[in-house]
Amino acid sequence: MSLAVDHACERIRNIPMSDIIEVVDLARDDPDVCKLWVGESDLPTPEFICDAAVRAMREGHTRYTYSRGIPSLREALADYHTRLYGTPIDVERVSMTVGGMQAVMQTFQAVCEPGDEVVVPSPAWTNVFEAARIAGADVVTVPFRFGNQGWRLDLEEFFAAVTPRTRVLVVNSPQNPTGWIMPREQMEAVLEFARRRGLWILADEVYHRLTYEMPRAPSFLEFCDPEDRVIATNTFSKGWAMTGWRAGWAIAPPSLGLVFENLLQFGTTGLPTFVQHGCEAAIRHGEAFLQRNVARCRTGRDVVCDALADVPGLRFERPGGTFYLMVRMEGLEDSKAFVIEVLRKARVGLCPGVAFGPGGEGHFRICFGVDHRLLEEAMDRLTGYLAAA
Amino acid sequence: MSLAVDHACERIRNIPMSDIIEVVDLARDDPDVCKLWVGESDLPTPEFICDAAVRAMREGHTRYTYSRGIPSLREALADYHTRLYGTPIDVERVSMTVGGMQAVMQTFQAVCEPGDEVVVPSPAWTNVFEAARIAGADVVTVPFRFGNQGWRLDLEEFFAAVTPRTRVLVVNSPQNPTGWIMPREQMEAVLEFARRRGLWILADEVYHRLTYEMPRAPSFLEFCDPEDRVIATNTFSKGWAMTGWRAGWAIAPPSLGLVFENLLQFGTTGLPTFVQHGCEAAIRHGEAFLQRNVARCRTGRDVVCDALADVPGLRFERPGGTFYLMVRMEGLEDSKAFVIEVLRKARVGLCPGVAFGPGGEGHFRICFGVDHRLLEEAMDRLTGYLAAA
C-alpha cells in the first residue's frame, strides 16, 4: 500500500520542516544548554497575569465564547492602540487570534487567491513564507542590504518586485531577525505606493514595543485610514513573556470584521476563554512589567554586542529593536551545521541564518531577551569556542 | 475610498455568518434564557482538570512547546485510543489541535487542492462546509433520510455523489445534529469504497463517547490500516466539559506527521502549554467524570424526548448518540424566525435547523447535555408556547 502522505496536497507535503525547530528538537529539554535560539524571554509569565487567568477558570469561564474574543479584551486592545498611536482605533477593527501566527495566516486566507504573490524583505521570519504558501500564494523575496550603516531596505528594490500578480506587501518592523526598524518616511511611501497599486500591507508589529532608541516603533496604524488595506498583526508573546499562551491579535479595516469572525469561527473557534482574561490583565496592568522587560532586553543586547564586538570575522549592527542579534560570520557557508556544532561543543543554542530564507545563510541569530548572566555565560562559551576553532 | 472588504478574497468574503452565532449573539449573556442552542454542557470543567492546568502555569509552563503537542499528552491519547479501540494507535499518529475545529480545517488543508470536492451527509454541522471552502474545496451534500426508522444514510446515494473531483468523504458519527450513529458494517463498506476510489475519509468522532445504547460508537480506527487515508478528528470539549479550552486532536496516518507538524507550526504554533497539562489530566483521570456526564446526558435526553413526545406536529427519533435532539416541525418554513420568536416569547434558546444546511430547514435542534431542571423548565416554556401558538 502506498503511503498516505503521497496523496496529500502537493504544495503542503512539500513544505520542509522549520530549520529552527529541527535544531531546537536536538536539545529542547537539555538544562545544560544556554538556549538563545527561539524568540522568547526566559521569564515566566508575570504572576498577576496568571492570577487573572486562574480566577477566570475558577469562576467557570471554561465554556465557549465569542470567536473574535471577549468584548472587554477587544475594548482593552482598542484603547491600548488608541493611547499608543494617538489616533482612535475602533474595537470593530480588533480580533483576537491564536498567537501572532494565526493573525498572519488569517490575513493571507482573507486576501490571497491561489497564485497571488506576496512580497517579503529577507532574511525574514520564514513562518510568514509558509503561511502564505499554505494559503495558496507564492512568495517573492527582496534582499535587505547590510553595509556600514547596518541593515537597510531599498524601497526601489521593494517596489520593483511588485508584478500584476502581487497582492500583499509584508512589512515586519522591528524586524526579525535583523532588528531593523522601518522609518516613518518609508512607511508613508509604502502606504502611498500600496494605495496606488491596490495592494494589501501586512504589518507584523510583534516587536513594536521592544525598541531601545525610541519609545515604540513607527506604525502604519498611526496614519492610515481605517479602510486602507492594512492589517497589523501582533502578540502577547514577546512584550509580556507569554509565548506559551498562544494569544495574539489583528487590527484590520472595520469592513473586514465578518471575514475575520468567519475565519476564526471556522479555523479554531477562538482562544481559551480564561486565557483571554489573562491577556486582559496583561494589557490593562502590564505596562510596568513591559518596561522592565524592555530594560532587561537592552541590558541583554549590550552584553551580547559588547562580548562579540572584537571577535574577528563577526559583523553586526547593534539592533534598535526586537530582541535579536543577527551576526554575519566570515566564511560561514553552512549555518545549520555550524550551530549544531556550537550546540554540541559549546552547549550554546543559536539559530542558523539559513532558517531566515534568502540572505540568511552566512549568519547566526541570537535571542538576547534573557537573563544577562545566562548571556554572559553563553558569550563566554561561544567566544571560547570561536577562538579555539 | 472603496471598502477594504471588497478587495478580500472572493470565496472568503462570501461566507455568510454562522446562523447559530447570529441567533446566540441576540442573548448570549442573558441569564433569563434557557440556553439549549450551542453544543456544550452547562457544567464547569471538573476541578481536577483545572488544578492540573493551574499547577502547570504556576510551575512556569508558560513558554513555547512542541507544535504538535507535549509528548506526554500525545502518549496519553495514543494509550487512550489503543485501550478504547483494542488496536494499537501509535503516538506518531496523534497531533493536538485548537479544538476539533482546527483538526477539521487542517485535514482539508492537508489533502484538498483548489476545486476538489468534499462529500458530506446533511443536515450537518456546517462549520465543516465552511472549513472545506476556506481550504479551496467545493462541498457536495447527500441527504439523510428521516422515516419511521429515524435518520438513515443510504450508502448508494452517498457513493453516487462521488465524482472524479471528489477528494474527501466526511463521516460524522455520532452525528450532529441528528444523533445518527453509522453502523460498523456501513463503515466497513465506506472504507472499502474509499480505498477502491482513492478517497480520504474525514471521521469526525467528537461525540464518540456520548452514546446511550452502546459503550462507545464504532470507529474506522478499529479496523483501518495505519496508512489508510483516514483522519479522525476529536475534542476535549464535549466529554470533559471543556468547550472553552479549545483543545482537540487528530489521529492521522503516521506518514502525515510532518504535514500536521507544519500546518500546526505555521497555522497557530500549537496550544497553550498549561492547557495541555489540563488535557492530560482529563484523559488520564477523567473516565469517572465522563461516565457521569454521559449518564447526565441520558437523563437530559429522556426529559426532552418525554416532554415533546405527544406534542402535535413534532417528529423526532430518540437519539442513540450526541447530546442533540433534532425535531421536525410540521409546517415550519423559516426556522431562524421561529427560534428567534421562541427566544423572545418563551425565553428558550434553540438552534434553527437551517443552520445545518440542506435538509435542516423545517427543524430545530435542542442540546440536552445540561441540567435536567433547566431542561424541564425549558420544555415547560416551549410546550406552553407551542400550545398557545
Image (cartoon, coloured by chain):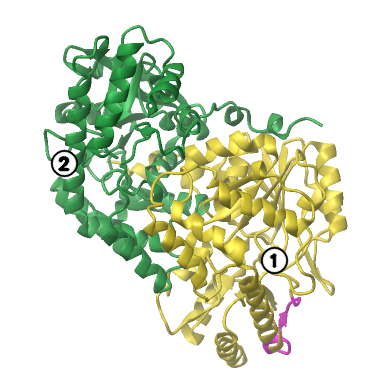
Chain colours: A yellow, B green
Q: Are marks 1 and 2 in contact (CB under 8 Å)?
A: no
In this image, A57 relative to B5: left or right?
left
Q: Give the residue at mark 1.
A: A209
Who's the residue at 47% across and 70% down the image?
Answer: A24
Q: Which residue is mark 2?
A: B295
Q: Label 1: few (<14), some or many (≥20) within 10 Å?
A: many
Magenta region: which residues?
Answer: A307-318
Chain label for disc 1? A
Q: Which amino acid is tagged 1?
A: Arg
Alpha carbon distance from label 1 to label 2: 52 Å
Residue A313 belongs to magenta span: yes
Residue ID at (27%, 25%): B379
User: At 21% across and 45% down in the image, what residue appears?
Assistant: B293
- Structural crowding at the residue carrying mark 2, measured as other residues with C-alpha within 10 Å and reported as few (<14), some (14–19) or many (≥20): some
The image shows residue B84 at horizontal and vertical percentages of 16, 48
Give the structural element (helix, strand or loop) at label 1. Answer: loop
Q: Is residue A216 visible?
A: yes
Q: Main secondary structure of the magenta part?
A: loop
Q: Quadrant of residue B230?
A: top left
